[in-house]
Image (tube, rainbow, N blue to C red):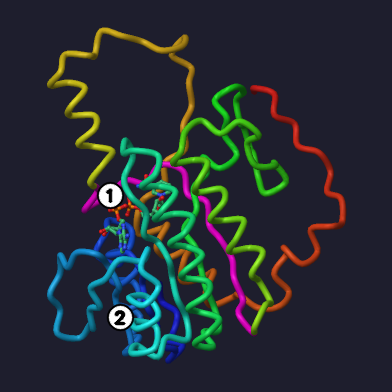
Amino acid sequence: SNSAPTGDSYLVIGGCGFLGRHIVDALIKRGEEEVAVFDIVQRHFDSNIKFYTGDLTNIEDIADAIKKSRAQVVIHTASPPHGLAADIYEKVNVAGTHNVIEACQAAGVQKLVYTSSASVIYSGEENLINADERIPYATRPLDAYNDTKARAEAAVLKANGEDGLLTCALRPSGIFGPGDRQAITGFHAVIKNKQTKFQIGDNTNLFDWTYVANVAHAHLLAADKLDLTYPVLVLHEPLPPVDLSLG
Ligand code: NAD
């Protein structure tokens, strides 16, 4: 990004993760001087970034980091990885995100940007082609990850405009690039386990992938542009239906 620094103070929750790290890098690269990270583990040691180690399921941990970092903008990108027990997603994604919202409101944070997932509208039953915000949440979510990401996102969007806090959510699909801890290791595991002789579907399956630095850039743009004209406030106006048919 070539844009100038805003001079705001930032806290990146999950900032030691794959995407979170790229968001931190993008903020530093454009010259932001107040960038802090909250994560349950510390994987990076940069002298210009303040790290707060804590668990977002514990409201004191996150409230303390927001207060100490004096964050004006909070970017919440933490989530457990795929393949864990359902109650972990419930705790971290739903309860943890409620903690983030509450702590932001209590501390007078101005903006909260949440990393949601494209999977919040995917039930596994029909193809989604050119789908956008008009598609409702999946009525039968595929799994606990998707279900809890959707409920966390809904809570974030509902909080928009409450107690002076502005919120928005981004829904990336697959993310690839340096630092990835899921996609490529997953492909390698498939090859190592000799599972490559199986084919699902007729080989015309599509899936969206976005380069991680572009997803990070989108988070900065979302934070920069977030104001009271955010469309969630006018979503009552009916939009034309979306054609989900293939091709
Ligand atoms: P990641 O696992 O690399 O990063 C997540 C970070 O959150 C980790 O550093 C982890 O330590 C931290 N974290 C987890 N639980 C925590 C807790 N209780 N308290 C504090 N920190 C905690 O994952 P990622 O791939 O960078 O994903 C980032 C976000 O993007 C997630 O919200 C995920 O749902 C979303 N997303 C990812 C993809 C993808 O393809 N990777 C696709 C769509 C959406």
- Residue 227, image x, y percentages: 65, 78
- Residue 85, image x, y percentages: 34, 38
Disc number at residue 124?
A: none
Mark 2 and ligand 1: say if the CB distance to the nearest ligand atom is below 8 Å: no
Q: Amino acid at mark 1?
A: Gly
Of 70 and 195, nearer the camera is 70
Q: Are marks 2 and 1 in contact (CB under 8 Å)?
A: no
Residue at mark 1:
177
Q: Amino acid at mark 2?
A: Ala
Q: Helix, strand, or loop for circle 2? A: strand
- Residue 98, image x, y percentages: 51, 65
Q: Is residue 151 above or below residue 160?
A: above
The C terminus is located in which quarter?
top right
Of 80 and 126, nearer the camera is 80
Of 18 and 137, nearer the camera is 137
Which residue lies most toward the right here? 237
Q: Is residue 47 above or below residue 56?
A: below
Residue at mark 2:
36
| Ligand 1 - quadrant of the structure image | bottom left
Q: Residue at x 41, y 53 (%)?
A: 91
Q: CA distance from mark 2 to mark 1?
A: 23 Å
The N terminus is located in which quarter?
bottom left
- Specify which label sits upstream in the sequence, 2 or 1: 2
Q: Which residues are magenta?
A: 164-180
Q: Which numbered mark, 2 or 1, is in the foreground of this view?
A: 2
Q: Residue at x 84, y 43 (%)?
A: 240
| Dot 1 alpha-carbon crowd within 10 angstroms: few under 14, some 14 to 19, many 20 or more | some
- Residue 21, image x, y percentages: 27, 65
Of 33 and 146, nearer the camera is 146
Residue 24 in the figure: left or right of residue 41: right
